[in-house]
Image (cartoon, helix red, strand yellow):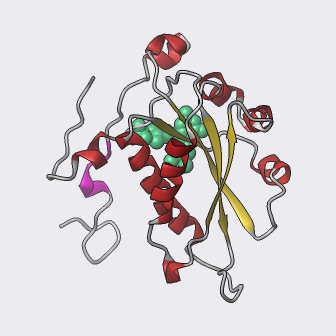
Amino acid sequence: MQKRKAAYPILDLLKDRWSPRAMAGESLSHEELYTLFEAARWAPSSFNNQPWSFVHADRDSEYWNTFLDLLTPQNRRWADKAGVLIVVLSRSLFFYDDRPSRTHSFDTGAALENLALQGYSMGLVVHGMEGFDYERAHQVLKAPKEYTVEAIFAVGKPSSLSVLPEELQVREKPSDRKPIEQFVFKGIFGKTT
Ligand SMILES: Cc1cc2nc3c(=O)[nH]c(=O)nc-3n(C[C@H](O)[C@H](O)[C@H](O)COP(=O)(O)O)c2cc1C
């Protein structure tokens, strides 16, 4: 496997986590799945508001096909081998006073990175998706109106490349990142010197 190179010495976990697509079509145990949610639980959030919610469909549950149908055909062709599909939502109003929260999506993104890092460290595939019908997801979940659907995550046991269509097999490797100079600035946006 191609190794990523960090420009500064960060934790291996941060550098090595990636989003494969090849999964074995096996269920996760309750313990495995809830360990991921426990990781998400400890993320920081504005006012410790913890705006995230997760609605999951296990592959052997009555909800599986409904969740799978939300995905674009491009995502369905690999995500159908996940053990679980997790819809990630966040509450757009603070819990304690129902005032709009500016950071609910930001906070929920932090929770997701916790979940993804935990999953990677357990040898699981964790792969985010925006390729799905957001409106229909909100409807089928019967989510309250103050909740935003943020993403769906496919989580599963890893598998060999052969389960993927050829076009996806060649893309099944860790991606690189933009250099720091392209997104870190001094004092004024865009200024690097
Ligand atoms: C919120 C979110 C949405 C994504 N949507 C899709 C998607 O619809 N389909 C897909 O194949 N990958 C999707 N990805 C995966 C990204 O393409 C991937 O995380 C990115 O290329 C970086 O690669 P890495 O996670 O392997 O480091 C998504 C990732 C995130 C975090």
Residue positioned 78% across, 38% down in the render: 63
Q: Which region of the structure is painted magenta?
A: 177-182
Q: Nearer the viewer, residue 62 or 49?
A: 62
Residue 64 lies left or right of residue 49; in this view the side is right
Tell me if residue 64 comes above or below residue 107 in the rendering.
above
In the image, residue 26 lies at what x, y percent?
57, 25
Residue positioned 45% across, 57% down in the render: 39
Tell me if residue 22 comes above or below residue 103 in the rendering.
above
In which quadrant of the rendered view does residue 183 lie?
Answer: bottom left
In the image, residue 167 lies at what x, y percent?
52, 15
In the image, residue 182 lies at what x, y percent?
30, 55
User: Farthest bottom residue?
Assistant: 97
Residue 142 among magenta residues? no
Q: How many marks?
A: 0
In which quadrant of the rendered view does residue 177 lie?
Answer: top left
Q: Nearer the viewer, residue 121 or 75?
A: 121
In the image, residue 25 lies at what x, y percent?
59, 22
Tell me if residue 47 comes above or below residue 134 in the rendering.
below
Residue 174 lies left or right of residue 162; in this view the side is left
Residue positioned 71% across, 35% down in the render: 71
In which quadrant of the rendered view does residue 188 lie?
Answer: bottom left
Residue 109 lies left or right of residue 64; in this view the side is left
Q: Nearer the viewer, residue 62 or 149?
A: 62
The quadrant of the picture occupied by the C terminus is: bottom left
The quadrant of the picture occupied by the N terminus is: top left
Tell me if residue 94 comes above or below residue 89 in the rendering.
below
